Image: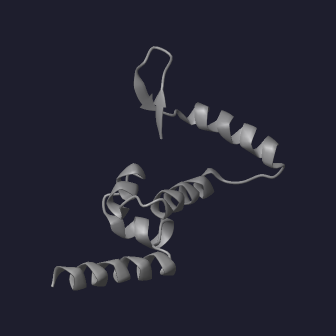
């Protein structure tokens, strides 16, 4: 995940920074969790907001979209049907 440092440089969270974020989140949530669960939540939230699977996959640093699609971010059935309906509507209007 990108991080903006105080000097304006942009980098990525270090392991130590993630540990601190995780500790704070666990304290607020009142329950333990694994950071891997945050990756899946992040990926699915991005997909649900309309991000392409390619963008989500790249953000997770996967080489291909296959792992992203199988384990992290799936298109929800209602979104898939809406996308197909939109495609058919565009096709009908183009005639």
Quarter of the image where the C terminus is located: bottom left
Seen from the viewer's position, the closer of residues 7 and 48 is 48
Name the side, left or right, on which 22 lies relative to 71: right
From the top left corner, tell me how far across and down residue 50 is, in percent. 42, 61
Seen from the viewer's position, the closer of residues 39 and 93 is 93
Residue occupying the point 72% across, 54% down: 33
Most extreme residue toward the top is 7
Seen from the viewer's position, the closer of residues 50 and 30 is 50
Q: To which quarter of the image does residue 89 belong?
A: bottom left
Name the side, left or right, on which 24 lies relative to 14: right
Residue occupying the point 84% across, 49% down: 30
Q: How is the image coloured?
A: one colour
Most extreme residue toward the right is 30
Residue occupying the point 41% across, 27% down: 10
Q: In the image, is residue 95 above or below residue 58?
A: below
Q: In the image, is residue 85 above or below residue 17?
A: below
């Amino acid at each position: 995940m990108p991080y903006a440092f105080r000097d304006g440089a942009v980098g990525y969270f270090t392991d130590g920074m993630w540990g601190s974020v995780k500790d704070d989140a666990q304290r607020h949530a009142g329950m333990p969790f694994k950071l891997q669960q945050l990756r899946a939540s992040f990926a699915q939230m991005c997909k649900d907001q309309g991000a392409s699977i390619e963008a989500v996959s790249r953000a997770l640093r996967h080489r291909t979209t296959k792992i992203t699609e199988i384990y992290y971010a799936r298109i929800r059935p209602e979104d898939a049907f809406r996308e197909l309906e939109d495609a058919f509507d565009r096709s009908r209007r183009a005639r």
